[in-house]
Amino acid sequence: MIHSFDLRIDALTTAYRDGRLSPRTVIGRLRESAMALNPQYRLYIHLLSEEEIEPYLQALEGQSPHSLPLYGVPFSIKDNIDLAGIPTTAACPAFSYVPRESATLVAQLIALGAIPMGKCNLDQFATGLNGTRSPYGACRNSVHLDYPSGGSSSGSSLAVALGLSSFALGTDTAGSGRVPAALNNLVGLKASKGLLSTAGVVPACRTLDCVTFFTATAAEASHLLALCTQAMQPDERDEYSRANLPHNDAAAFQPPRKGLRVGVPRQLEFLGCSESPALFVEALGQVEAIGGVPVSIDFGPFLEAARLLYEGPWVAERYSTIEALLQERPEEVLPVIRDVLRKAPQFSAVDTFRAQYRLQQLKAECDRILATVDCVVTPAFPRPVTLEELREQPVQRNSDLGWYTNFMNMLDYAAVATPMNFMKNGLPWGITVFGPAFSDQMLLGVADALQRAHGRPLAGQRHIESRLLAA
């Protein structure tokens, strides 16, 4: 069965308050659609059963739709984030456990009225940017089946792009909340480190990990961020969490001012893509149309910081999470993940400190560059890669996707993947807007202005319309 209701948060909330829809109706129809689509897209590892969803529905039926800001809003959860009573696998069956309590952010969202739909597929242990590194199957792109969904938050992006959830939670250590967003016509908010609690998240690199929102619009991401950070307090369960700053509240979500200085890298790389250079020039034209002033910047230090993530000792931080499993049952870890992590034990404490010193030097240099502009715009990725290319060169092609993403958490910046256009074959194409830590709402304001300016079909809505036409 194909549903045709609008899953955007404001539209759905209005429909509930007007009595046109009920959460029970919406969730039931979404479950039917999810069961029909999952065999092709492999987006859910665990779709909640009717019995598992029932307590959430019953909790809402005793309340008014006006009582909770996310009343009846369906959301999906990357399966390295805990939902109480439901297995967390991190896409590794041997690692699976059943948490007694939900991740802090999941619990917050449920308390605000949101209803979890299921646990989403991912690149195993969140190690990858493509969405094919999972024993539960490869996640294909929502628009073009010859391409991956992007990862590691592959299933989470598909849950929104296929019209099965209003929003989804992913994680982003090296780009996992931005690459799949860009490949599926979504907004992907990688908030400032620590702004959204990672308590209840299986670590990839714990010092770098971020929980992310996938939404159809920047306005929705802004709304969710404001709801989850309004207390302005760090999470006691997460020692890496940080309190939000007053200047980064909902009031900062505004159209960009005229004369906004937008950094544009001098060192642009498209890895031979014939379409992306022109698409980026067009995107810069749209940035100017909303009041931005392009400013050329040196991007070399940012790219050097990006290389440290996998070429330096930070790979050992990934290794530490699954060290026992790798030593005792290495066959349970996918070969490509073992290949990525195999050099981790070779790094010494001396190597680690030297790398930290170099990173600090690079951050000082990058911060000075960033201080000359209000934000920076880059392509979301140099070029898309096909499923066939990933089969032939899984490590290199995966690395290509992270060209413009790997440095972000290393340097402690906030970033928003923003959909901009479509390639000739229909594949979505987007940009990333980034800035200093705690500039999240300002960046979302820029992304919102760009979305409103070009007025292209939204993810989910576009997919539903195409399926309705074909039905």
Image (tube, grey):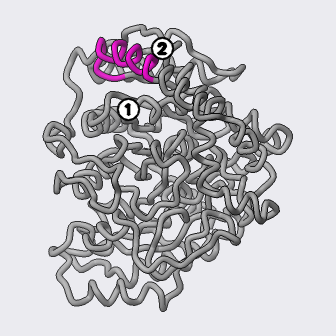
Chain part drawn in magenta:
360-375
- Residue 189: x %, y % from top left: 40, 44
In percent of the image, x 50 and y 20: which residue is there?
358
Q: Nearer the viewer, mark 1 or mark 2?
A: 1
SS for dot 1 = strand
Q: Disc 1 or 2, which lies upstream in sequence?
A: 2
Foreground: 189 or 365?
365
Which part of the image, by quadrant, shows the C terminus?
bottom right
Residue of label 1: 413
Residue of label 2: 265
Foreground: 233 or 427?
233
- Residue 128: x %, y % from top left: 65, 46
Query: Vertically, is 54 above or below 141?
Result: below
* Main secondary structure along the magenta-highlighted residues: helix
- CA–CA distance between discs 1 and 2? 16 Å
- Residue 322: x %, y % from top left: 64, 57
Quadrant location of residue 284?
Answer: top left
Type of amino acid under label 2? Pro
In percent of the image, x 26 and y 73: which residue is there?
111
Q: In this rendering, does residue 457 appear at all?
A: no
Query: Vertically, is 168 above or below 454?
Result: below
